[in-house]
Image (cartoon, grey):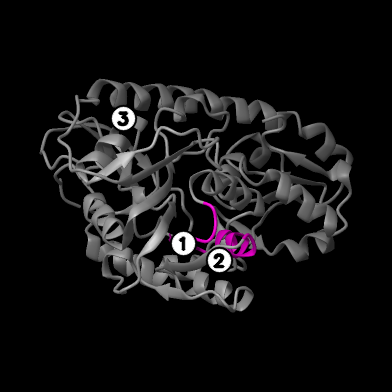
Amino acid sequence: MAAIACPLCGEHESHFVRTVANRDPIAEAVFPTVSLSVCRKCGLIHQNPRISRKKMVELYATLEDKAGGGVTQMESESRLTSLQKLKLPPAKILEVGCSDGTFLGLAAKHGYEVAGIDPSRINLQKARLVHRNIPFHLGFLEEFKTKERFDVICHFYVLEYSFNPRRFLASARRLLKPDGIMLIEVPDAEAFPKLPFANSLFSHQDIAIFTRATLESLLKTSGFSPLSRRLGRASKMYGLRAAATPGPVASHGPSQYKPGRSALQHYFKRRDAMIKRVERRVESFHPAIAKNVGPVVVFGAGENGRIVTSTSLARNGREIIFCDNNPELIGHKVDGHIVVAPGKVPRLRPALVIAASIDYQDDMVQQMRSLGIAADRIVKLYEGY
């Protein structure tokens, strides 16, 4: 991996902060660590050094293409509410990084004309099976060629993956009508220190992590005018939702170096404390495990689940089995524990099922209940959040 220029301002003045382990079980063998820096010039938090774009494209073509993705109905409804505040039908929408098409399907039901683009074949296979009347395109926005112009371009948790965010936004601007609107969600570095969970929010995919100030600076220098309308909370608690219209190209604003560095430092301090809190939460599960027979099932083989298996749970002698909805993990081992599909959990007669996710723990509980697992044998790792 090589040192790079800041993706926002192009300067070579980065302050290295910390290297973190990449805990994505799909990709950690290829990219085991993520190096985080803050640009001294503009304050953008970004990977530096980072992997090459060629390597990342290869990853999408192999690992990521297999991993698939999904968007919940609740996330889609939240985004639709913001969209309706910005532009009512009739309007033509392009969603970049459309995943399985859940949001576009919902928007179409509310009268919008929709289309989607995504680099994952698996995602688009799922989308086309469910949403047969929606045009979906395989690939990246920067290479997307069409004569169509759109009233709205949406991208949710996509911009942070772009190796050249200004080129990405230039492509979006080219496809927007002059009075068009762009609706965005990105991870918000300033929200990270306040989060109630312990997993890392930095993966091999995260080229840049924004604050509101650095996002607005990127938009302005890319020919967009940020809108100040209230759009509601982002669909994830660590997210930032924003909107912009095509506008004049502006110069960079004041440096956000100190706020960016401070956000990272506070985040890592809180995360270290939260890992200890997870240990105490897992200890509270021991009485329920002791009175029941059977293995302990950890629902979620991502980082939250892996944090759980590094606690006292792994030291009490009870068999631990991962459960996950990702088909590429099923049948394999993560940290030495086999991963099974949710449908196999009832046959295991588990002593306890731990829903190990902050975003999807309610969905996990509902899925387990629908499979016949008793309510008193399901717990949430982050109860009350």
Which structural element holds mark 1?
A: strand
Residue 222 is situated, as x and y percent measured from the top left of the image, at 22, 46
Name the residue: 33% across, 66% down: 140
Q: Is residue 118 left or right of residue 81?
A: left
Question: Quick one: label 1, few (<14), some, or many (20+) residues within 10 Å?
Answer: many
Name the residue: 48% across, 28% down: 271
Mark 3 residue type: Ala
How far apart are labels 3 and 2 at the CA level? 31 Å
Question: Quick one: label 3, few (<14), some, or many (20+) residues within 10 Å?
Answer: some
Residue 358 is situated, as x and y percent measured from the top left of the image, at 62, 40
* In this view, 282 is above or below 355: above
Which structural element holds mark 3?
A: helix
Residue 304 is situated, as x and y percent measured from the top left of the image, at 57, 42
Mark in the foreground, 3 or 1: 1
Which residue is label 3 attached to? 213
Q: How many marks?
A: 3
* In this view, 44 is above or below 98: above
Question: Quick one: label 2, few (<14), some, or many (20+) residues within 10 Å?
Answer: many
Q: Is residue 359 left or right of residue 4?
A: right
Which residue is label 1 attached to? 93
Which residue is label 2 attached to? 100
Kindly tell me whether residue 349 is visible in this rendering: no
Residue 105 among magenta residues: yes
Mark 1 and 2 residues: CB-CB less than 8 Å, in contact?
A: no
How far apart are labels 3 and 1 at the CA level? 26 Å
Instruction: Give the residue furthest to the left.
Output: 12
Residue 245 among magenta residues: no
Q: Which residues are magenta?
A: 88-110
Mark 2 residue type: Asp
Name the residue: 41% across, 32% down: 228
Look at the image and tell me in which quarter the C terminus lies: top right
Which structural element holds mark 2?
A: loop
